[in-house]
Amino acid sequence: MPTAASQSATAIVRAVRAGETTPAAALQDALARAEAARGLNALISINEHAGEHAEAVQARLKAGEALPLAGLPVVIKDNLNLTGTRTTCASRMLEHYVSPYTATAVQRLISAGAVVVGKANMDEFAMGSSTESSAFGPTLNPWDLARVPGGTSGGSAAAVAAGITAVSLGSDTGGSVRQPAALCGVYGLKPTYGRVSRYGLVAHASSLDQIGPLARSAADLALLMNVIAGHDPRDATSLDAPPAFAAGTPDDLRGLRVGVITESLDGNTAGVSAVLAGTLDALRGAGATVGEVSLPALKHAIAAYYLISMPEASSNLARYDGMVYGARGAGDDVSSSMIHARESGFGREVQRRIMIGTYALSSGYYDAYYSKATRVRRLIADEFGAAFGDYDVLVTPTSPFPAFRRGEKTSDPLAMYAADVDTVAVNLAGLPALSVPAGFEEVDGRRLPVGIQFIAPALHDELLLRIAGGLEGTGHVRAEAAPGVLG
Ligand code: GLN
């Protein structure tokens, strides 16, 4: 029996384990859907070794191994290393780079029986909010092909929304799993900093980066988190907190203390405000109490985020000189060759960030910019801490607006940065947060998905999936099939 595009990861794994289908057949289905959805440009490459990997899973099943992700096709963002595949970070700089090793999170998927179908498109080096800065062309939003899927994990989100795979991995430095999940109508979790190993994730801003899963149900997110989370000695920031994820039921909402962050109530489209209000009603209806809480330092979150992420990025990207790492530049001497490598290898946004980041770290400006931003970061973390004295979970829209049109913000970097207003503070504070597909806004006669974000205290990632499952149970939250793509 072929696996359907709308089939859940849980159902695919069950069918493979029951012998109703094989890993190779599930892979073929996913590849056929990737081919049919080629126009979305969600994938940068197909994993040429996927067939062998599927056969290996079959052999392990035959040998009696109990594999929690048996034969599950997955898509991973193209900043995650997988031995023998290209890892481009959607950049010319790494266009021909073939990974000599595998990221821990990806290895855990494979060890559990998953099969990597392909590598997802993204903003170059995970810098952006729309997947338009990819050197390999933009990804389209399956809900409206004229619009962006969000970013930077836009390929991972579009692949799941379009049913190429049931689940995918992205990375989230300032919202890059949650915002594309919201704009594509799927679930996206940014785990507590340290919950998922960053080993093998190409670094953007190391103090903020986290790998996170995207899926079409809370149960599927739980399935993935139970595999990818956990301590890894290869990541010095990895935490030792064994995962115990499960999708909840409406019972989990009873008595839950929900705090709406008042700073997130302004500047939203009417549709986003309406979906937030509807979500709060659903929570109250299920027995939660809903209050409002102000975190005044959040008005500085975007400034602090960019003044921390850009300096970190400028240091992390210093290694791409065309000598040790990255495509070789032309030139008669070392310095002109390096300059050429960096000018031709990096796109405009990446170059802009390297320059601003370097400036903010330079002597005489360090105190005014980088150091001040780290103090704001502490203030934000403290305000979250105080809010969690009164509330179990905090809620905001994931994005102030649904998917915007391609090209709408590309000439205005500040407008693009402003798209992250609801997500970046979570990374600064190292907290877990989940975007759930909570409704739609109708724009120009089309329904565009709207995401609502739940933020939990550090290491309370499990609570987020209980809430998501609870809201699914009330019927308020669900990932619908994108029109004409899912079958
Ligand atoms: N949009 C944010 C940025 O451009 C977040 C990116 C991310 O999370 N990788 O930095």
Image (spheres, helix red, strand yellow):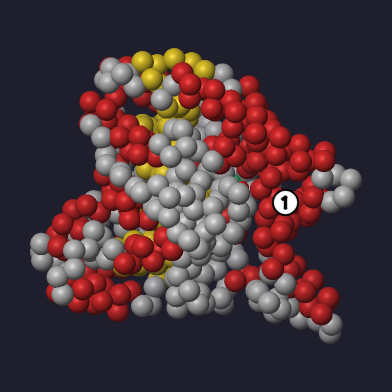
Inspect this view and state whether residue 282 appears: no
Q: Which residue is drawn at 27% across and 42% down?
A: 246
Q: Residue at x 38, y 20 (%)?
A: 257
Q: Where is residue 188 in the image (x, y as percent from the top left)?
A: 41, 44
Residue 347 relative to residue 121: left or right: right
Q: Position of residue 242 (x, y in %)?
A: 36, 49
Q: Quadrant of the N terminus?
A: bottom left
Residue 35 relative to residue 389: left or right: left
Residue picked out by circle 1: 311
Q: Which residue is drawn at 46% across and 18% down?
A: 390
Q: Residue at x 36, y 15 (%)?
A: 289
Q: Of residues 455 and 328, which is closer to you in this image?
A: 455
Relative to 305, residue 385 above or below: above
Q: Where is residue 67 in the image (x, y as percent from the top left)?
A: 22, 63
To which quarter of the image does residue 303 belong? top right
Q: Of residues 269 and 258, which is closer to you in this image?
A: 258
Q: Of residues 10 and 374, which is closer to you in this image?
A: 374
Callout 1: SS: helix
Inspect this view and state whether residue 340 appears: yes
Relative to 95, residue 403 above or below: above
Q: Of residues 343 and 225, which is closer to you in this image?
A: 225
For the residue carrying disc 1, how many other residues have a C-alpha within 10 Å: few (<14), some (14-19), or many (20+)? many
Q: Give the residue type that dot 1 points to.
A: Pro
